[in-house]
Amino acid sequence: MNFRYRLTESILPHIALLLYAALALFPIILIVMNSFKTRKAIFGEPLAFPNAETFSLEGYLTVWERAGFPLYFRNSLIVTVVSITLILLFGAMAAFALSEYKFRGNTFMGLYLALGIMIPIRLGTVGILRLVSALGLVNNLLSLILVYVAMGLPLTIFVLTSFMSQVPREMKEAARVDGASEYRIFGLVLPLVRPAVATVAVFVMIPIWNDLWFPLILAPGESTKTVTLGVQQFLGQFVSDWNAVLSSLTLAMIPILILYIIFSRQLIRGISAGAVRG
Amino acid sequence: MQSETPKKQKPFPTHIIVFLAPAVIVYTIFMIIPLADSLRLSFLAADTGQFVGLQNYRTLLTDNLWSDQFWNAFRNNVQFFLIHMVVQNSIALFLAALLSRRSLRGTSVYRTVFFMPTVLSVVIIGFIWQLILSPLWGITEGFMGFFGLEHYFQPWLGLESTALNTISLISVWQFIGIPLLLFYAALISIPDELIEAAYVDGATSWTVFWRIKFPLILPTVGIVAILTFVGNFNAFDLIYTIKGALAGPNFASDIMGTMFFRTFFGQQLQLGNAAMGATVAAMMLLIILAGVIVYLVGWQRRITTYEV
């Protein structure tokens, strides 16, 4: 009886979960592992870990020599960091206005800004490209930044508005009595919703860092390529050089996986909070 | 900067404008106006730029040169979506149901692992699976050999009959983390007392799940469905990475997103056409809006939400 109970309550669920975990991890581990092996070993024993005999860094050398990865990383970093900063700043300001003040058109403004949650910005690409060409911003990282800010704002404003409206009134009213300006009060509220801001930051960051569409269309030039586009084109050219392909895949995965593992608790808690609320 | 005491009854005091302006300006200029501009373009002739009403739409839907491609992409996209709904969301629900059991330990490790593919770029995922499924490397064939199934191996990504299904399953593998976490979050927010009461009454785990937990998380099921729908009818990256803009073999894996890209930018024998590109995008917008409306009117309003 006891064993049967443990079997259905604990052992079988763990087996199912472990199987799926293996399916989720296997492809990633396989690529990382083989990126450190000689070409012969990649094909000869793909499932073996690299050992003293099969260890090789030749793929990484090719990537280092041939691809402009440092430049692509720099571009991706600039685009992602600047976009996130502006999204969080502008988004928090707008969310503060929507949650704090009753003004004419408040509901309309909230709905207007929420449109972008359901309508993908990609569908406006024809218009965006025309606009960006008219502004002379093709192959300029600024065009990517502005598009990503517009793309990230709706969700950010939506989430932060709901968090900010939960900040107790008394504190703000007390500050007002002390003669604080509205800008000062915004400065007081912001730290109180820091967890929500951090969660939104991670959520908005992933699609920006990983985006292929807009870099491909707005900034395909060599000097403005992002990591995602750079990897995509590098892989296209080096299809037959398996060492280089595996190494560049590993290089592109590692930073985001490290960031993810650092922030995963935040991220998962954020989804939970959002869903409970929704 | 000294600001006066706020008077809320006054319409639009300066500070509200200051708070709203940056977001509204960037959002309007780079999202709303381009969307409106794309819609406007879809009513203009490609060559002369003159207003032609619904002519582009008629061409897209009925002219053989376009309509075959369009309906093919649409059908493929529906198939792409259905595979996500059935495979992705039911596996996600199953795993979330297991993870949300209170007796289970180590769930945070599983959650972290299951979400890992989701944070990676679609480009990386596309190439990883291309390598794994490649007959050249032979990983999959070798793996199937363990079970004596090596004869069933085929270059699935290269065959017209299997390319779309294979790509859909790769996409399922990548994005399963999102529905899984949403289901998980909804399941753990169900109060313990409700579930314990049912067990005391002699219910089995199976009946507790379908009779108590599942009805309680129906709002999340709706959210997952609409997120899947919007995401799938807007998909592009994975197919472009694996198959390129021609979405081969013979357009077998073409969906709306790849058709949009090809129409707008042109590919090989086909010249880029902004007006027709805008028309394809407008059709995608209509499809997505239709889905959102069905969700808001047909689902969200009708289902009973239980206060827990």
Image (spheres, coloured by chain):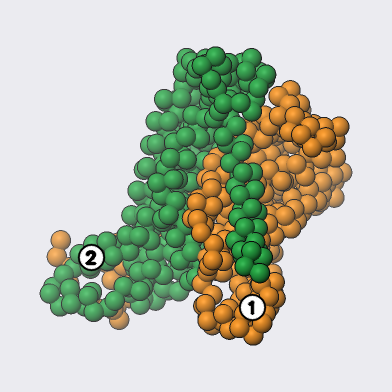
Chain colours: A green, B orange
- Residue shown at 57% from the left, 44% from the top: B117
Return the residue at label 2. Answer: A188
Q: Nearer the viewer, residue B36 or B218?
A: B218
Q: Is residue A267 left or right of residue B35?
A: left
Q: What chain letter is assigned to the residue under label 1?
A: B
Q: Nearer the viewer, residue B39 or B197?
A: B197
Question: Is disc 1 in the same subunit as disc 2?
Answer: no
Q: Is residue B252 left or right of residue B216?
A: right
Percent coordinates x, y for residue B241 in the rendering: 65, 34
Q: Which amino acid does the dot numbered 1 rest on? A: Ile
Q: Is residue A182 left or right of residue A221?
A: left
Q: Which amino acid does the dot numbered 2 rest on? A: Leu
From the viewer's perspective, is residue A174 above or below residue B269? below
Return the residue at label 1. Answer: B212
Q: Is residue A276 left or right of residue B155?
A: left
- Residue shown at 28% from the left, 62% from the top: A190
Is residue B180 in view from this perspective?
Answer: yes
- Residue shown at 58% from the left, 78% from the top: B195
Image mark for residue A243? none
Q: Nearer the viewer, residue B304 or B133?
A: B133
Q: Which quarter of the rendering shows the N terminus of chain B?
A: bottom left
- Label 2: state its secondary structure: helix
Percent coordinates x, y for residue A181 in the rendering: 18, 68
Percent coordinates x, y for residue A111 in the rendering: 50, 68
Query: Is there a contact, CB below 8 Å, between mark 1 and mark 2?
Result: no
Q: How many marks?
A: 2
